[in-house]
Image (cartoon, helix red, strand yellow):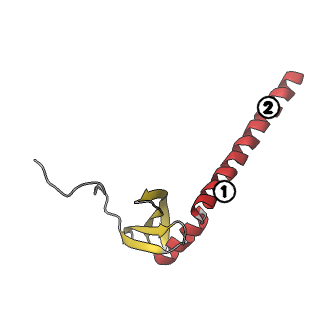
Amino acid sequence: MNMKLIAGGALTGLVLAGSLAGMVSAQSVADATGLTEEQVIEIALMEIPGEVQEVELENHRGQQIYEIEILSADGEEMEVEIDAQTGDVLEVKADREGCDKDDDDTDEA
């Protein structure tokens, strides 16, 4: 009986520790960027109403940028780029699947 209590207590402790680590991690991202993911999503949805598909924090030439992919109300996939420090919308564009951003636009056969 005591072993079950100990095991249950240990499991509960691990679950709580994982939850705290997730909260600390989210706070660390907010501290490093100035904005939380929730704030960035709100900004993006003001530009393009719809359903958020993906949120990525990336480094572009030394600048932290959130890229938010949204499925708009009319079914078009859009991408909103937001400065992670200021919350300024940098770009709104159609998200063309199959287009590699790192492609040098050369066609080789």
Residue at 29%, 55% in the rendered image = 100
Residue annotated with mark 2: 10
Residue at 49%, 64% in the rendered image = 52
Q: Picture coordinates of residue 30 (x, y %)?
A: 62, 60
View extreme (left): residue = 109
Regarding residue 1, the answer to whether it shows in the image is: no
Q: Nearer the viewer, mark 1 or mark 2?
A: 1
Task: Report, in whole angstroms, how far the alpha carbon at label 1 lies from the one at label 2.
Answer: 26 Å
Q: Amino acid at mark 1?
A: Gln
Judge whether 40 appears above or below 16 on screen: below
Q: Quadrant of the N terminus?
A: top right
Q: Amino acid at mark 2?
A: Ala
Residue annotated with mark 1: 27
Q: Picture coordinates of residue 25 (x, y %)?
A: 64, 50
Judge whether 31 appears above or below 92 on screen: above
Q: Residue 2: name its quadrant.
A: top right
Depth check: 33 or 6 in front? 33
Tag 2 secondary structure: helix
